[in-house]
Amino acid sequence: MTETRLLLGHAAAEALYGELRETLRTLPFVPSLRVLRLGEDPASVAYVRLKDKRARELGLKSAVEVYPHDLPEEALLERIAELNGDEGVDGILVQLPLPPHIRTERVLEAISPLKDVDGFHPVNVGRLWSGGEGLFPCTPLGVVRLLKHYGVELRGREVVVIGRSNIVGKPMAGLLLREDATVTLAHSRTQDLPQVARRAEVLVVAVGRPYLVRRDWVRPGAVVVDVGVNRVDGRLLGDVHPEVAEVASALTPVPGGVGPMTVAMLMANTVKAALLRRHGAFR
Ligand code: GUN
């Protein structure tokens, strides 16, 4: 049996950081990222710290604004309006999930599409699906970049995405379509999910259920991308059972697969937002 190839996020992310450093060297300004966090959810605290750290390591300007979990929605919207108008800020990211008294849609729609480095604003969602230039969600961008780094062809391939979230599954399907893949977007109500998954030459799993995907869900030789991050008894488990390595030709580890790519693509989006805004493209 041939070895299953591991698709390593840190290696692909390093290649992207190298490209971004080259781009930054040519710019007469330093792109800047502003991250807003409400409350002290431990996962959000850790993610925001990592985003800030990577931005600084790359040489971007980065600042984190922390607010109490009971910050009124209006106050958050006012702060976003200020940052939209701040010439010194290129990218704005509001860490999710937000507390229940805040309407997430209102907040995401308040961020200027030009500074929307998460790619969650409806204008950017529309651009993703209409084929135009825009800012697109970091995790699905990271998956495409990771696959390209390892030479996985997408054009004309049978790709199945499991999971239909706004953050991963739906934009993943849109980006894969832009890569000329044949895309099936499956989810918890899909009939005979294992059989649908078995059609995939490339299988992307973003559900949030530990070890959902078993060996018999995977076509022999398929490339499997595990976007799952499930904390179980202090361990980090993917959505894909480790036994899948027995049939897949390539597989992303958890952790160390998609995760590092998400953060790297946020940096790429910040640089892209800075360029798009200054060059007047993308109105
Ligand atoms: N929480 C989990 N994933 C994400 C993400 O991609 N962006 C933001 N803003 N919050 C998140």
Image: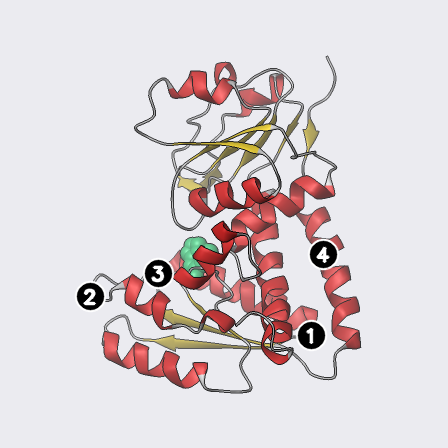
Location of residue 153 with respect to 191 vertically, above or below: below
Mark nearer the N terminus (2 vs 3): 3
Estimate the spatial distance between the alpha carbons at disc 1 and disc 3, rounded to whole Å.
27 Å
Callout 3: 10 Å neighbours few (<14), some, many (20+)? some
Q: Position of residue 165 (x, y in %)?
A: 38, 45
Residue on which disc 3 sits: 41
Residues at badges 1 and 3 in contact (C-beta under 8 Å)? Answer: no
Identified at 57% across, 57% down, the residue is 263
Q: Residue furthest left?
A: 101
Mark nearer the N terminus (2 vs 4): 4
* Mark 1 or mark 3, whichever is nearer to me: 1
Mark nearer the N terminus (1 vs 4): 4
Tell me if 266 is positioned left or right of 11 in this view: left
Q: How many badges with numbers are in the image?
A: 4
Q: Quadrant of residue 57?
A: bottom right
Q: Nearer the viewer, residue 220 or 236?
A: 220
Residues at badges 2 and 3 in contact (C-beta under 8 Å)? Answer: no
Q: Position of residue 231 (x, y in %)?
A: 41, 42
Estimate the spatial distance between the alpha carbons at disc 2 and disc 3, rounded to whole Å.
15 Å
Estimate the spatial distance between the alpha carbons at disc 3 and disc 4, rounded to whole Å.
29 Å
Residue on which disc 4 sits: 16
Callout 2: 10 Å neighbours few (<14), some, many (20+)? few
Tell me if 33 is positioned left or right of 17 in this view: left
Mark nearer the N terminus (2 vs 1): 1
Q: Position of residue 26 (x, y in %)?
A: 79, 76
Q: Amino acid at mark 2?
A: His
